[in-house]
Amino acid sequence: MAKLWAARFGKETDSTVNDFNSSISFDSRLYKEDITGSMAHAAMLGKQGIIENGETEKIIEGLKGILSDLESGTLQFSEEYEDVHMNIEQILTERIGDAGKRLHTARSRNDQVALDLRLYVKKEILAIKALVLEFMEALCASAEENLETVMPGYTHLQRAQPVTFGHYMMAYANMMKRDVVRLENCLEGMDDMPLGSGALASTTYPIDRDFVRQQLGFSRVTDNSLDGVSDRDYCIELTSALSILMMHISRLSEEIIAWCSWEFKFVELDDAFSTGSSIMPQKKNPDVCELIRGKTGRVYGDLMTLLAMLKGIPLAYNKDLQEDKEAVFDAIDTAKQCLKVLTPMFSTMEILKDNMKKAALKGFINATDCADYLTKKGMPFRDAYRTVGQLVAQCVKEDKSLADLTLEEYKEYSEHFDADIYRAIDLGTCVAGRCVTGGPAPSEVERQIGVIRRFLEQR
Ligand code: ARG
């Protein structure tokens, strides 16, 4: 089949170049956006008298037919035509004749692909956002059920101070809230309609860019044609937002992997969301979490692909830009895939409250509260800190917890100790006392859940 540009060329394209140049294998997924964009463009050409009105109707009807045939599977793209844009234009011309050849008036594939990708990314941002919101619901539900589920909080992976599982989950809800805001900012920042930029220098036809903008639901039109065809900032912003999102769910995955080990045993994954071993009969593996953790690297790779691909491209369009699609699609597909499995895995995970409590009772996570007790009785904090350090050292030696010491033993270290020390170092008291904004006290975590729920309601 002769190329569109055969008139200018003395030879046919080498087959290796055909394969190398072709993007239809991956950009075919833009067919809906391509058709939507072409319909708006054709309507504008007709309205402006650039093509005849009868032709506009023919084009739009033809495109509708192509869309429904593609959706029903009766029409397939051909490898013969380089990309989704050329395939659709070719099929249209085969079906409606000369009117099909007029569609590309005042347009280039360069502004066409810039438009298609923006339309696609806008749609996918909303889809990803919906999945994140769903996961945030699940986090809130779990937090609500675990307002009083005391567990050790860690620093350096050493037991540090008591928190609750509800408090812990709301930490992740706050991360996801920022992810949602980042996705929304990306959507708002990329809401410029590039069609009309032409190949690079716009067009001499009397087009109406604002009409096309309205038809396609953008807030603005791009303000410079060179930038309009070369800008892929929004791809970087999206993959960057997705990298951060993946980093968050990867951290949670890492926690869940640790928590379902026998070393922790804080949670038990549902059988439907775990896997077994081909050799070790006892195994129940958190493969889903590990894959999320692994796929995070892949999304980072997509971000790096785009940054590296773009850094040396002079204005305006260069074919390097075709490489944007696989990275963007992969990041979107991967994030969606991970979120779709994460939410049900998380929601069906059993929380082993007793094991969390047992772990909380060991490791002196109430030592700070013991020092605070002395401080409240008048001892300067640094002295109290040293005194409790000595108490802990004795407990470690005798394999005891602070609650095991008798009042006489306490009094050997300080006269400030009274019978009320036991209440002061009770884990429930320690958690309930941390009721400042952001703290783990059940009433405070309830407030935090309220903030996130309101955020969700507003979306
Ligand atoms: N398939 C191309 C891409 O994805 C479309 C634009 C091609 N433009 C060109 N002048 N070769 O970027």
Image (tube, rainbow, N blue to C red):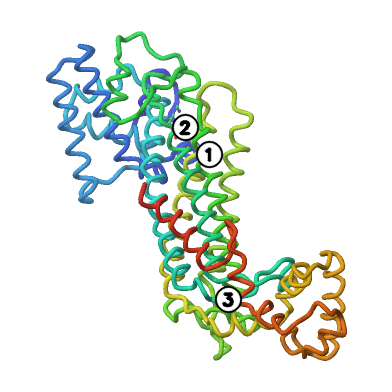
> In this orientation, which residue lies closer to the viewer: 57 or 260?
260
Picture residue at 22% right of the left edge, 32% below the top: 92
Picture residue at 53% right of the left edge, 45% below the top: 241
Q: Position of residue 317 (x, y in %)?
A: 50, 25
Tag 1 residue: 237
Q: Where is residue 264 in the image (x, y as percent from the top left)?
A: 63, 80
Q: Which of marks 1 and 2 is nearer the N terminus?
A: 2
For the residue labelled by badge 2, is the local secondary structure a helix, a strand or a loop? helix
Q: Earlier in the sequence, mark 1 or mark 3?
A: 3
Report the amino acid beneath label 3.
Answer: Val
Q: How far apart are marks 1 and 3 (CA)?
A: 39 Å
- 1 vs 2, front mark: 2
Q: Position of residue 172 (x, y in %)?
A: 54, 60
Mark number, residue 189: 2
Q: In this view, does 120 lie above or below 428?
A: above
Report the amino acid beneath label 1.
Answer: Glu
Q: In this view, does 65 lie to the left or right of 446?
A: left
Q: How crowded is mark 2: few (under 14 residues within 10 Å), some or many (20 or more)?
A: few
Assess whether mark 2 and mark 1 are in contact (beta carbons under 8 angstroms): yes
Mark number, residue 150: 3
